[in-house]
Image (tube, helix red, strand yellow):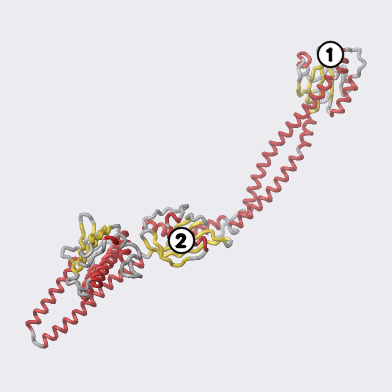
Amino acid sequence: MKRKQIFRLQTTITLLVCLVLAFVLLIIYFMFSQQFKNQTRRNLEERVVAVSRTMALTPSVQEALGNPQSSFNIQQYANKIRRLNDVEFVVVIDMEGIRRSHPVPELVGQHVAGGDEQPVLSRGEHKISIAEGTLGTSLRAYVPVFNAEGSQVGAVLTGVLLRRVSAEASRNQWILYWGLGLGGGIGAIGAYLLARKIKQTIYDMEPFEIAKLLKERNAMLQSAKEGIIAVDEHLQVTLLNEEGRRLFRQAGLPAKLVDEDIRSIWPGLGCDKILRTGESVSDEEVELGAVIVRVSSVPILVNGEVAGVIATFRDKTEIRMMNERLSGLSSYAEALRAQAHEFRNKLHVIYGMAHMAYYDQLQAYISETLQTHESEVGAVTEQIRDQVMAGFILGKMSRAREAGIDFVLLKHSSLPEPSRSEVMHHLITILGNLFDNAMESLKAEHLGLEDPLIELSVCYEERTGELNCIIRDNGSGISEEIQTAIYDKGFSTKGDDRGMGLYLVMLRVKELGGRIDCLSRRGEGTQFTVSVPYAVKDAVI
């Protein structure tokens, strides 16, 4: 069902930016409009004060006010000054407040109107006021007039009507109107271009489409059976899905990686090289802590430029576990093959003795064969309850016997069934590699040894919950100089393409949370001791 949408994202952004812009411009208008009005009023105040001061300092005006017999025409002079300075009125008054000049000649000789003349007449103060006069409400300035002796003889009143103040302020605001209009127009165009750019950046998608896409992507990422990790061009982790976090926890690494530098956590991933070259990596084996994973990495391209790397990785554990299970089955098959071969030989012997009627010898032979079976197969299956491990040991016994080497499972050995089969598969890998190393040492270096021997002890300690495995041979041993390096990947004294056995042993021991020790001296043989936590399968009652 398509979601109903009133406005598209581009329209919404444009309208929102325009509304914000209009609000800002409105605030600017009120602020500057008031400033224009105040400035206009200050200018007019300065003008009327200047006119009044000029008139008050004019000697002719001072003499005319001080001498009633003066021939100076104050009315004409005041009207001339009024017109030159573009003010509404210039009124000269005497100390009684009687007008000596006025724009309306009929009002000359009458008392000045407004009622604000007392401060200037009684105290000689300069005064700016707003008062109602004969011409209307006006902004006016009083300046006292003094004669040559310093005595006040009157005052000059100059003013402009308030409606003129408002009119001049409005005329001066046209620049503000033009500026606001231009700013609004540019802002509206900018809002449209910004909205268009944002829409192009998100590939012309609407918000609900992006939300839907993110939900689908998140569902796919979290349901994937492979780990997925993404980094940006600065090698900062931007994404890690749930399977990836599980694998990181399994490897003993922190699972919260977002915004972390991938080089400090997983340097083997090689994202920096992919960012430089832009080349993909397919199905490469990489170590993730104690876990080996297979990784496929591809660069993220934006407008032809590498903007990051996304990698998928999966644990080889399942494949390895299957291989190890097959190894266990192979051990069974090997044991059965060896036993079948021996059984066939024994049948031939029994058939020959029966044919020749050597019944006493036949009875002794059969008795010896049964004892051998009980000492090997019976003892192994009695001590080792896990069938996979029992088959593994029987197979190794057959191999050792064919090579002329004694392989002994010590009598005190006991191995109950584990609660998790994965533990047994790891143990098979560990013991199998240690046994193969002992076999190769005895066969390759000690062909002249009279009694080549391999001893195996497998004991479960109920008190500590640990399984202790000891495998010992009487070969030439390992020199102390190389004992610290035998677990390194690729280290071997047997030539090229070797050196993985003990490395895998150490990996499996670490995975199980155990430890391994090597005790060896040159000419005295080698003993490996492996101790791992071991949970026993609950007994069925």
Which mark is on residue 148? 1
The residue at which mark 2 appears reads as: 270
Mark 2 crowd level (few <14, some 14–19, many ≥20, 10 Å Cα): some
Helix, strand or loop under label 2: loop
Q: Upstream in the sequence, badge 1 or badge 2?
A: 1
Which residue, as the protein is rendered here, is positioned at the far left?
Answer: 360
Q: Quadrant of residue 198?
A: bottom right
Locate residue 338, reporting x and y percent: 22, 77
What amino acid is labelled 2 in the image?
A: Gly
At 84% from the left and 13% from the top, the residue drawn is 148
Mark 1 touching mark 2, by CB under 8 A? no
Mark 1 crowd level (few <14, some 14–19, many ≥20, 10 Å Cα): few
Locate residue 70, reporting x and y percent: 91, 14
Q: CA distance from mark 1 to mark 2?
A: 101 Å
What amino acid is labelled 1 in the image?
A: Ala
Q: Is residue 121 left or right of residue 456?
A: right
